[in-house]
Amino acid sequence: MSKELSREEYKLLVEKAPIMIWRSNLTTECDYFNEVWLTFTGRSMEQETGNGWAEGVHPEDFDRCLKIYTENFGRRQAFEMEYRLRRYDGAFRWIFDRGVPFSDEAGAFQGFIGSCIDVTERREAREALKRAQESEIEQLRELLPICAYCKKIRNDSNYWEQIESYISKHSKVLFSHGICPECAAKVMDELGADVQKP
């Protein structure tokens, strides 16, 4: 049988949970951050409260982050977003932030509570996989299906065409035809053999 947690136990859970937790009030300003958040940013509660926390958001992510937050706050609906937040050592880390509206015991809306986790490694792995897939696709685009015997190339319409024709259509290369010494000797030998035939 589970016992009801005391106020002190709740406080301990919130402060020591392995996630960053924030709370905002009816003005949309933040009025609380747990110890994990403060340790991550290396800033004090006084520095982070109000809109102070936003000083740590990467400039490229700030407008998008603010828009998502304010629009969902106005609608009183949960939101999720990723943005870069400056860590205590100055490095920007990707944060997955989920905010949900909360109410008091009477059911009156009181603001939002949010939880954040560092997803930098996951995001970098995803980006690395995407780059590898794009590189593989690019390599496949550069492959030419060529006949091993006649050297014709199969085009996008699945027709085989002369290599000169295909390359001219897909580049600015122009061809001039001649005969290399090896082929010239071979052709001369064949012509000589034909001449000697009775």
Image: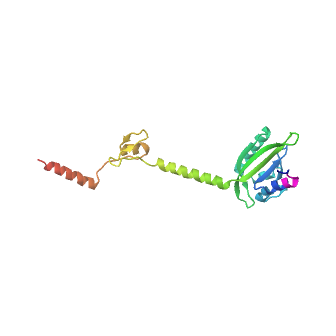
Image quadrant where residue 165 sits: top left
Is residue 195 visible in the rendered structure shown here?
A: yes
Can the viewer see residue 34?
Answer: no
- Determine whether, in the image, residue 29 is placed left or right of residue 170: right
Identify the residue at image location x=75%, y=45%: 66
Residue in view at x 43 percent, y 40 percent: 156
For the view shown, which residue lies furthest in the bottom direction? 89
Percent x, y of residue 19: 75, 54
Residue 146 at x, y = what percent? 38, 47
> In terms of depth relative to the viewer, which is nearer, 153 or 80?
80
Q: Quadrant of residue 70?
A: top right
Taking 42 as reference, is 133 left or right? left
Residue 56, position as x, y percentages in the image = 76, 54
Instruction: Depth check: give the residue in front, 85 or 102.
Output: 102
Instruction: Report the number of numbered marks.
Output: 0
Question: Residue at point 59% right, 54% down?
Answer: 128
The magenta segment: 5-10
Specify whether residue 191 is painted magenta. no
For the point 54% across and 49% down, the residue is: 134
**Which residue appears farthest toward the front when viewing the image?**
1
With respect to residue 94, does 104 lie above or below?
above
Residue 44 in picture, x, y percent from top left? 83, 58
- Who is closer to the viewer here, 22 or 179? 22
Q: Magenta-highlighted stretch: main secondary structure? A: helix
Front in this rendered view, residue 36 or 58: 36
**Is residue 7 found inside the magenta-colored segment of the image?**
yes
- The colour scheme is rainbow
The residue at the far left in this view is 198
